[in-house]
Image (cartoon, grey):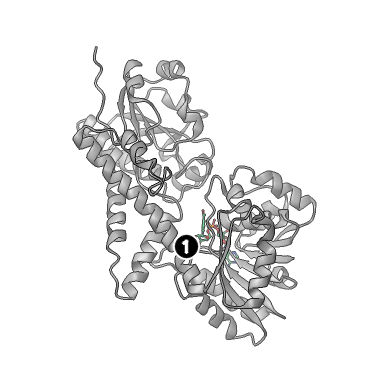
Amino acid sequence: MIIAVVGTGYVGLVTGTCFAETGNKVTCVDIDQSKVEKLSAGQITIYEPGLEKIFLRNIKEERLNFTTRLEEAVEDAEIIFLALPTPPGADGSADLKYVLGVADHLGKILKGYKVIVNKSTVPVGTADKVSAAIAKNYLGEYDVVSNPEFLREGVAVDDFMKPDRVVVGTRSERAKKLMSDLYAPFVRQGNPVIFMDERSSELTKYAANSFLATKISFMNEIAQLCERMGADVDMVRRGIGSDDRIGKLFLFPGIGYGGSCFPKDVQALIRSSNEVNYGFQILNAVEKVNEIQKLHLVKKIMTFFKQDLNGIHFALWGLAFKPNTDDIREAPALIIIEKLINEGATISAYDPEAMPNVKMQIGDKIKYANNQYQALENADALIIATEWSEFQKPDFERMSKKIKSKIIFDGRNLFDSSMMVELGYIYECIGKKRQIDKG
Ligand SMILES: NC(=O)c1ccc[n+]([C@@H]2O[C@H](COP(=O)([O-])OP(=O)(O)OC[C@H]3O[C@@H](n4cnc5c(N)ncnc54)[C@H](O)[C@@H]3O)[C@@H](O)[C@H]2O)c1
């Protein structure tokens, strides 16, 4: 099939590359000229494990192209995917200006039957709005389909190539047939393509992300109880996670959910609910809990240093909002950095992939280390904000030689508390009482 993907960010680039990998001819469009130039020259613009190899292969095979010209990409395309930003507007609702702007443009240039597929996360009713925006200028045949994306950054290629499920919202048999054919190679193992109406499909994405955010906030509240009651959240997690009805995943407490999806999607669903006169009480609480949790580690740090961080130097491991990505949108580490710097502290940070993005955003407000051990030099304490695997099993001997004071504030519960005490560390983590050295 011939496919156009409009928007070549985290979702668009993975979508375009993976569709090319299954033999389709894909043209990705972006308004960012420098991004298109890089991609056309074979330089990948995001860090996503496994993506570069198939990206290069499909460029070489001439199945994957990049352009800034929408006309050129959609001319022969049978299916046009929209993978555009839907950032929160001032009131928290999803801003549809990118999606509707492209829909309006499409109306002026379409020729022949096309399926326009919305992959962006959009409020219920957006398919109708996209359709209306196209219809203003286009009298030909087309269908607008909702096909929310469930990939997780860090494992996006695997998620796309072997999805748990594909959700497709359309009432058009013609569009349904095309979408079934396109996705057939991805669901050969029998995972379902679930067809439904457009509105249910649009709501499915918000429901999924909001439920996951709820699980995180719930565990963060249990962690708060553990700290106050002398229980261990890891034990509680294992105790409840082995119940199939609860499940083992997404039960890890931490320093609040971040990233480009959960915060904005929870906000947008609260906002959409208000618009239909329904106050979504659970989600309001999920958001509030997350705001508190984002500052939980900072609070512990402030208490430890008796509310005075002047002259205190921290090592910070992890900047990305989660491991295996360079994405720093709404990353908890950035909130920690801002708070600590405002209190007079200095920071040396290390992240395997996200440092260039942080540098672009906050410049030299912090120092950037060449590796995790260099970041520890002269540090009064180490803060862990992202659970990259290389932080999980460090060389403790090397670590102990570098760090000035053996104090760790771990927002991801990477280490065994008793072992850290044995190694002579003061180890503060989430959802456990600080262990005191028995000696
Ligand atoms: N990132 C994720 O993990 C993820 C997962 C599932 C769903 N989503 C949703 O997918 C959508 C895209 O997210 P993302 O993370 O890929 O965003 P992104 O910001 O990484 O990418 C969006 C791209 O669209 C481009 N763009 C903006 N206006 C354009 C226009 N008029 N024409 C062509 N290109 C244009 C931007 O330059 C950018 O490259 C959002 O709605 C998001 O909520 C994201």
> In this picture, is 136 found above or below 291?
below
Mark 1 CB lies closer than 8 A to ligand 1: yes
The quadrant of the rendering that contains the N terminus is bottom right
From the viewer's side, name the closer residue of 192 and 295. 192
Position of residue 339 in the picture relative to residue 364 (left or right): left
> Which image quarter has ligand 1?
bottom right
Which residue extends farthest top? Answer: 439
Q: Name the residue under label 1.
A: 205
The quadrant of the rendering that contains the C terminus is top left
On the question of residue 209 being in view, the answer is: yes
From the viewer's side, name the closer residue of 27 and 21. 21
**Residue 184: x %, y % from top left:** 68, 60
Residue at x 31%, y 19% (from the top left corner)? 421
Position of residue 116 in the picture relative to residue 286 (left or right): right
Based on the displayed image, in which of its 4 quarters is residue 276 positioned?
Answer: bottom left
> In this picture, is 347 found above or below 86?
above
**Residue 60: x %, y % from top left:** 79, 50
On the question of residue 87 being in view, the answer is: no
Q: Which amino acid, by three-letter code, is at mark 1? A: Lys
> In this picture, is 78 found above or below 241?
below
Position of residue 316 in the picture relative to residue 1 (left or right): left
**Residue 132: x %, y % from top left:** 54, 83
**Residue 338: x %, y % from top left:** 34, 43
